[in-house]
Image (cartoon, helix red, strand yellow):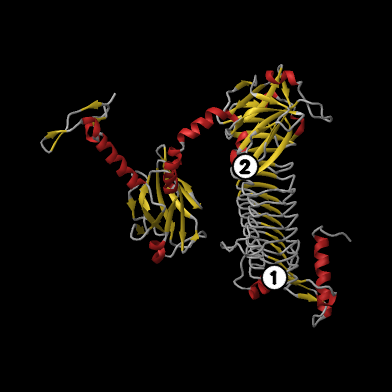
Amino acid sequence: MAKIKKVIENGGIQYPATITDAVKNPNNGKTVTEELSELGSKVVKSTLSNEYKVGNNHKLYASFSNDDFSVIKQSTDSAVILPVLTGNGIIKMELDGVPFRFVAKVRKNGEVTLLTDLEYLDLSEYDEVGLLVWIVDKGSDFVEPSRVADVIVRNNLKEVINGLSEVINGLSEDINNILQTAISNEYRVGSNHKLYASFSNEDFTISTTSSDSAAIYPILKCSGIISMMLDGEQLDFAAKVRKNGAVTLLSSLKSLDLSEYDEVALLVWIKDKGGDLAFVSPERVGDIIVSIDSSISSAFMYAVVDKENKVVAYIDKSGEFHYKNERKDLDKLNSIRIDNGAWSNADEKLNTIVGYNSAQNSRLNKGSKNNIFGIENLWQAENASHNCAFGYHSLWRAVNASQNCAFGNETLDNIQEGKNNCAFGPWTMKSELNNDWSIPVSFDENSAFGAYSQYKIRNGGKNTSVGAFSMYLSMSAEKNTAIGMGSGYNTDGSSNVFIGAYSGYYSNSDNELYIDNQKRGSNDGEKNKSLVYGKFAENISDQMFKINGMFSCNGSEPQPSKECSANATDLNSCITLLNEIRSALIDCGILKE
């Protein structure tokens, strides 16, 4: 119990119970005034207002020390925004009314981590948060140093605090509602029902207009998974539900997640309506057991759903595995959705979704048969089908893409439409847009193997590239084959063949052949110094094959390089060269007579 002390003020004794200076905390000896003062100080220091302009509260070219979160000046690419935050609220940043991604150094349980590319940050998840913005171009959002002071930091905590008074004012009413609407884990209907009744759509009051149902009350406004039992057997039931003002009747339910609706009214059929609808004799309604398991509502870590999108089994946050209602008929498995951020939209069909925020912002209304493993994969998918995404941000923007395979971080990241593409390796076919999301990205039948292969591709198709950075700058290239690191690096042409590391590195033409293993400084250098350079054409007379070097096999006398083409000045020398090559290949055992 708090101790009361005598307070003398202005020469007189004050009534102690009427002032905060008179009440002391028995644990630390501080008065309520002192406690409130310290608490207010902490709130002021640790939270931001709803709209906070950085102004002079930043330091350029600085970062935070890992040990005490003090500002140091060892960085050359960031600005630190003060103060260090230790409160609650969702932090966002914007400049000139446009949101941008920012950086934060966070401490949790003594461990310090740098988080980048943040659209928002929940302060309540960390012990301390230091905010930063990039002030140099690092391939992510950055702010010019002169503009850092104009950055607006937003925190919705003020909105939360403003709403507290309304919550407090309505607390007594809410308590009454909770007492009237919540049910225990096991609830026998008893006399809490009305026969031949239903619920009114307008205000969910019980009416007696129905002749085939019993209404079970009270109206439910809580969370949990509802199910019904009669004589130890699971019972099908019906429910009238309200969500966002719309009222719907659901029937043939084995369970229902209350958290998905604003109001739920339970009913059972008491008349045989034919078909698969179960019914209960009117005199047995009072014996029905209604159970609600609030431990699995909004608390799934992993969930398995059936063809009706109902939870069949789940793993709770403690790691325990459960068959819902001991139901073990897993033969109707449809979508498997793992991690609570991976299945907030419930229209998936025959999809496997594993990973935080995968398919989070999508609807997948018509899409099906997608296999999604990782973080934020197929984020915007709607009609996407038959895709495989493994890694972080793979097929992130794939609204209508189909039959694609993406393996690795940000593979096929920005493709919107397209099919039959295969990307293996980090950032392959990323389609880098420099945050200009108005650019359409659509292409078909590309294959890329190796980090950053076809990194810039936007609308080219039918390309095959193997090796890191192969066809790196290609945007509209078509029908190219590039094998080797950096091969075809600059090409935006079509129908080229590049074989070897850096082969055709500077080429940006069509129908060319390069065989080489090094950069040659320019495209002219490549044509004249690559081991082999050639031109493809529909007409034989327009084709060309050139060896840049001496030709020898099995110790034969090296022959000087020659250009061979049907329109060469000396056609006889070309024929002679081809015969020499043929003879040499026979001597090497590559060709037979």
Looking at the image, residue 453 sits to the left or right of residue 235; the answer is left
Looking at the image, residue 348 sits to the left or right of residue 588; the answer is left
Q: Where is residue 315 in the image (x, y as percent from the top left)?
A: 61, 30
Frontmost residue, 537 versus 243: 243
Q: In which quarter of the image is the C terminus?
A: bottom right
Quadrant assignment, res 485: bottom right
Kind of residue at disc 2: Ala
What residue lies at 83% left-to-right and 61% top-to-bottom? 586
Marks counted in the figure total 2
What residue lies at 83% left-to-right and 79% top-to-bottom? 571
Kind of residue at disc 1: Gly
Query: Can residue 255 be seen?
Result: no
Looking at the image, residue 25 sits to the left or right of residue 351; the answer is left
Looking at the image, residue 436 sits to the left or right of residue 22; the answer is right
Residues under labels 1 and 2: Cα distance? 58 Å
- Where disc 1 sits, the SS reads loop
Residue beneath disc 2:
342
Q: Position of residue 301 (x, y in %)?
A: 59, 34
Label 2 crowd bin: few (<14), some (14–19), many (20+), radius 10 Å: many
Q: Quadrant of the N terminus?
A: top left
Frontmost residue, 216 versus 222: 216
Q: Residue 549 carries which label?
A: 1
Q: Where is residue 60 in the image (x, y as percent from the top left)?
A: 36, 60
Figure check: 232 above or below 314: above
Figure check: 363 above or below 182: below
Name of the residue lying farthest toward the right: 593
Q: Which of marks 1 and 2 is in front?
A: 2
What residue lies at 84% left-to-right and 60% top-to-bottom? 591
Q: Earlier in the sequence, mark 1 or mark 2?
A: 2
- Where disc 2 sits, the SS reads helix
Q: Which mark is residue 558?
A: none
